[in-house]
Image (cartoon, rainbow, N blue to C red):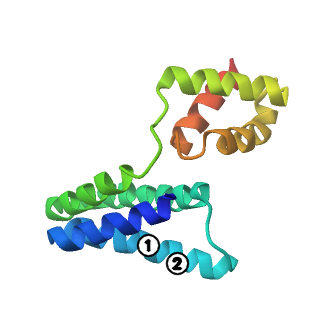
Amino acid sequence: MNLQDEISAALKDAMRAKDEAKLASLRLVLTAIKNREKEVRRSLEDQEVISLISTQIKQRKESIDHYRKAGREDLVKAEESELQILEAYMPEQLSEEEMSQALDEVISEVGAVSMKDMGKVMKAAMAKLAGRADGRAINEMVKEKLSS
């Protein structure tokens, strides 16, 4: 069963359980998937679905930050519940140590020696670690490794 089918099955379960929060979140994800499929005119691979979910997660985190600054705790709670639902469909996140090892491998593969090689390293790292690590965390760790 691919990830899209898994999400569709979870949507049906949420309908049966009358879980409105989960239902709304999964509908948004499936709509994003369907829209992307129309754009590319083919079914999406699991990695592409993970990328879409990752984008949705990033949007939720940004919304949470904005709502907190505005003092809207009611909206923060709603976004946090959606965030938890979406994160359940992401691959297991890498620990700090695992990400460091993976980035060391990428840096040696690319042959990076200075900050000038940041773009090459980031491109390779994002491809290798897609969905398993936050892009911002990867960026910070790459900067740290290349500047030392």
Q: In the image, residue 100 lies at what x, y percent?
A: 59, 23
Point 46% across, 26% down: residue: 95
The answer to which of 25 and 138 lies nearer the viewer is 25
Mark 2–mark 1 distance (CA, rounded to whole Å)? 6 Å
Point 69% across, 22% down: residue: 104
Say whether residue 135 is visible.
Answer: yes
Q: Amino acid at mark 2?
A: Lys
Q: Quadrant of residue 103?
A: top right
Say whether residue 69 is visible.
Answer: no
Q: Residue furthest front?
A: 1
Q: Quadrant of residue 140?
A: top right
Q: Which residue is mark 2?
A: 34
In screen coordinates, is 57 left or right of 64? right
Point 21% across, 67% down: residue: 21
Q: Is residue 13 above or below residue 107?
A: below
Report the disc number at residue 30: 1
- Do the residues under discs 2 and 1 have CB atoms within 8 angstroms? yes
